Amino acid sequence: MMDLSPTGLLGAVAGTVIAALIYGPLVVFIERAFRSRAPSASAGERRTLEQEMSMLRRAVLAVDILVLAGLGYWLGGMIGG
């Protein structure tokens, strides 16, 4: 059975909260970078770009939560022993 540290879990929750706060500005920054590099001319290209942006937002959310929750758990375990 796995031993989960209570302080590690508290750190993971804090990391998830921080990930939620960072998500909005991070997505805006990444979308601006992608839109500036991919000027769309036709309606089909714009539709494809919107679908890709939707998948990109989901990927950013998943990575954001996984990384910061994991980092929070690790830091909580290190600090709390």
Image (tube, rainbow, N blue to C red):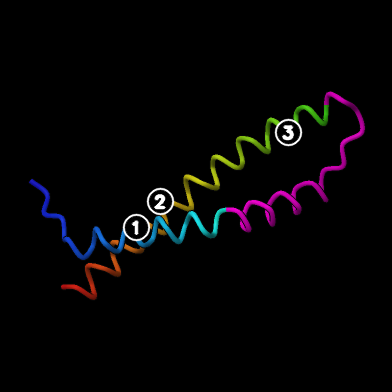
Q: Which residues are magenta?
A: 24-44
- Closer to the camera, 22 or 66? 22
Residue 61, above or below 69: above
Residue at 60%, 42% in the rendered image: 57
Three-letter code for the amino acid on which mark 1 is drawn: Gly
Q: Mark 2 belongs to which amino acid?
A: Leu
Q: Residue furthest top?
A: 44
Q: Are marks 2 and 1 in contact (CB under 8 Å)?
A: yes
Q: Measured from the top left, where is residue 19 in percent x and y?
A: 47, 57
Give the mark nearest the N terminus, 3 or 2: 3
Q: Earlier in the sequence, mark 3 or mark 1?
A: 3
Residue 43 inside the magenta-drawn segment: yes
Residue 72 in the magenta stretch? The answer is no
User: What crowding class fits label 3: few (fewer than 14 Cα within 10 Å), some (14-19), or many (20 or more)?
Assistant: few
Instruction: Give the residue drawn at x 52%, y 59%.
Output: 21
- Report whether 74 appears left or right of 60: left
Q: Secondary structure at mark 3?
A: helix
Label 2 to label 1: alpha-carbon separation: 6 Å
Q: Secondary structure at mark 1?
A: helix
Mark 3 — residue? 50
Disc 1 designates what residue? 70
In three-dimensional space, the C-alpha distance between marks 3 and 1, rounded to whole angstroms, equals 30 Å
Q: Please tell me which residue is depicted at 75% across the width and 54% down the height of the picture.
A: 33
Rounded to the nearest angstrom, the CA distance separating label 3 from label 2 is: 24 Å
Q: Secondary structure at mark 2?
A: helix
Q: Quadrant of residue 53?
A: top right
